[in-house]
Amino acid sequence: PKEIFLKEYKKPDYLFDSVNLEFQLGEDKTIVTSKIAVSPGTEGTSSPLTLHGRDLKLLSIKVNGKDLKSEDYTVDSRHLTVSRPPGGTFNLEIVTEIYPQLNTSLEGLYKSTGNFCTQCEAEGFRKITYFQDRPDVMATYTCRIEADKTLYPVLLSNGNLIEQGDLEGGKHYALWEDPFKKPSYLFALVAGQLDCREDSFTTCSGRKVTLRIWTPGQDLAKTAHAMYSLKAAMKWDEEVFGLEYDLDLFNIVVVPDFNMGAMENKSLNIFQSRLVLASPETATDGDYAAILGVVGHEYFHNWTGNRVTCRDWFQLTLKEGLTVFRDQEFSSDLGCRTVKRIADVSKLRTYQFPQDAGPMAHPIRPHSYIKPPYRSDINSSNFTGRWTIFIPVYEKGAEVVRMYKTMFGASGFRKGMDLYFQRHDGQAVTCEDFYAAMCDANNTQLPNFLQWYSQAGTPTVKVSSSYDASSQTFSLKFSQEVPPTPGQPVKEPMFIPIAVGLVDSTGKDMPLTSIYSDGMLQSLTSDGQPVFTTVLQFNKKEEEFIFNNIPEKPVPSLLRGYSAPVRLDSDLTESDLFFLLANDSDEFNRWEAGQVLSRKLMLSLVADFQQQKTLALNPKFVDGLRSILRNTSLDKEFIAKAITLPGQGEIMDMMPVADPDAVHAVRTFIKKELALQLKDDLLSTVTNNRSSEAYTFDHDSMARRALKNTCLAYLASLNEPDTTELAFIEYKSATNMTEQFAALAALSQNPGQVRDDTLLDFYNKWQHDYLVVSKWFALQATSDIPGNVANVQKLLGHPAFDMRNPNKVYSLIGGFCGSPVNFHAKDGSGYKFLGEVVLQLDKINPQVASRMVSAFSRWRRYDESRQALAKAQLEMIVSANGLSENVYEIASKSLA
Ligand code: HT7
Ligand code: ZN
């Protein structure tokens, strides 16, 4: 497989001004005719025109209406090259034959449960026709679709419907025209039997936009929340960024077979079912929130991605980091900002940090790739696993965008966005263009900021503090260290914005008036008033900041709101952390103080466990959590998050040699001990948070359910008759999936008859609902019960499992890799299972297989015996015959 390098970027030799496509959709083959108006990219070019193409049968090729002679072009398995194109502009016409019904890769044109559907990002368009399939070739498109009218009554493509009508032989056609220039990866076509929910949105300039969500008829009732989310996103983008939708029609299509969550094709978004369909009985609060976020995300791409796109796939974070940031802000504005921030930071720690510390580490803009770097589908609420692939581009990319906002404030950030669109609408651009727009709009530069795009690894920021009572100054001394990563042994300092508040002994924020840094005195007032949180611009290897007029020794609240994606190593004492947990006005840091305490506690108990000492829980820790649980002034979802222990993965990441058995034993011990000591509070919290009201998707109701479910899980971990009975009652009496599934999950922690019976009962009840069955698979797959590999192996043969459906694969196989004790079982059974499945899956869907194989990527983090077992599986995979590029890239990089 060929590695591609950022530094080798070359502009295309030819531009495509307009593209007219015609599809004759058939049962055994599809004929695609593509007519392209070509012009030279550089004047007078006579270089050959090379087009990409895969799995295509070329039927004919014409230039300016004349068939090309066979000596005037060459075709190989990946390209078609016109050797001597005529000078100046010309028309190219290519006819190809393709076989969507045989396409299981779900890239290009494929069939999904009887309907035709496309996925072109990143390089799927080349499976439809020969084309310069690269994002910097932008053209206007028309698309004429012809198909059997009974089998495919609905024919959709991008833009506006210009014409439609009946044809002979029971066929019909539709002609679509997209007036906006776009790259080929945003092309889409859907044909099939679908019904739609229709609504409308009137834009800020008074234009009425028709909104349609297409799905098989039986699911229409479940599209109400997605429609609500779409309208909310349209409104939010106008209000926050002044961005109005630009066409009169916006379609969303739901398909059950889809590699990623969803796709932002111009005016024709395609979604996998779980990110659109929801009803209170079948979807959890997590599902509802994911739908809001992803519908928003894909809609926001209309400006950040579609109107302004990426010059090449190295710049992917330009659209994805920015759009993830926008969807995070959207969800925060519609829900609870702190809780959303906690969820996003947890995701970053669970997925990004480990990757940044392993063989797959790469910057948010990689220097090279074999396949473009996408994130795995970690938005899934039924997926809690730890298999990671290329997260930086999305999640860390969003943190980088957030830092611009932290530096420039909401209005400065908006000015930067306005300038970005003013300069680049209709263009394919780079991350430097975004940086330049942000800095130019704010008349400043951010020294060392661009390092975030090119350096991999999570920086560690060390901070030590000292108070001088005589001068009433408080000093913070920072140093930063970016660890070496593959191919980048030495790192430069980065620009790190650190939001700081100083908390006095009564728990209040101190007024901040002035600061010394770099030998300069700087005022910190705003409109003559002191501020309570300031952002320090730390961009050197080491730097000291001295606050003036500080009347008593404060407790510093550092990196408020998690103002930069770094690991913070501070000299805060245990009592400082308990103080911040109880008092910090920055709620994020309040939660963070609890997490730091939990991490310290878990690591010290892991050491005790490894030395076979008796485990004992620090009573101050129990008291701290008890007071949070009893604090009625706190948001309930915040409480739920604050009493939740860090995940096993997070703790393993902090160990020199990851020990899944010890971490699992310690986490289970703390959970049970807390449940025992807080039993009365937990019981009353469950009882007080029952509700007989009908399900609503609003923050207060979701927070209530989150708190109740978290407490129930603690209680059920005791595995005592009364707590099991309680969980069983909750399971039976639940009227929504959020509570029913949480009770099932609580019960299924403990092996035995109740677990088996309840799982069976749940399946019998929901076997007709494919999305609920996916949750059922995921719950069993992620289970920590001993020897679970045999159970998962058995589930592979379950009639409801289908290896061709990515969602089911993510649930069962991805889910299994997320259970540290079972995936990393000492006897290697988990590794052997995954090795075999990856090879099987690679033949069906290489993209999905490559996501699965990434679970092996951190094999060096484990003890020698596990290392040998995992390495053997990776070696077996890379040496397999006919392996895809996708799997090869991940497996070989993991071994390197
Ligand atoms: N931009 C979309 C990415 C995507 C994708 C990438 C590769 C293969 C299949 C895919 N489906 C969707 C989704 C997004 O980030 O919004
Ligand atoms: Zn995206």
Image (tube, rainbow, N blue to C red):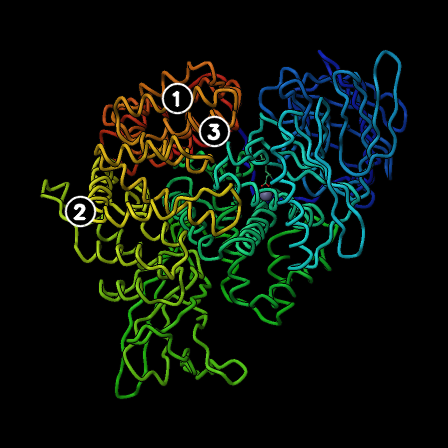
Tell which circle, 3 or 2, labels the residue nearer the N-terminal end. Answer: 2
Residue 410's x, y, as percent? 58, 65
Contact flag, marks 1 and 2 (Cβ < 8 Å): no
Query: Front-most of 674 and 43?
Result: 674
Classify residue 643 as left or right of residue 385.
left
Q: Is residue 517 above or below residue 341?
A: below
Assess mark 1: CB under 8 A from ligand 1? Answer: no
Give residue 761's mark. 1
Tell which circle, 1 or 2, labels the residue nearer the N-terminal end. Answer: 2
Query: Front-most of 514 and 276?
Result: 276
Category of crowding for the residue at label 3, using alpha-carbon neighbours closer than 10 angstroms: few (below 14), some (14–19), many (at least 20): many
Query: Front-most of 675 and 879?
Result: 675
Give amino acid for label 1. Asp
Question: Disc 2 marks which residue?
Answer: 605
Q: Is residue 496 above or below residue 649?
A: below
Residue 347's x, y, as percent? 42, 46
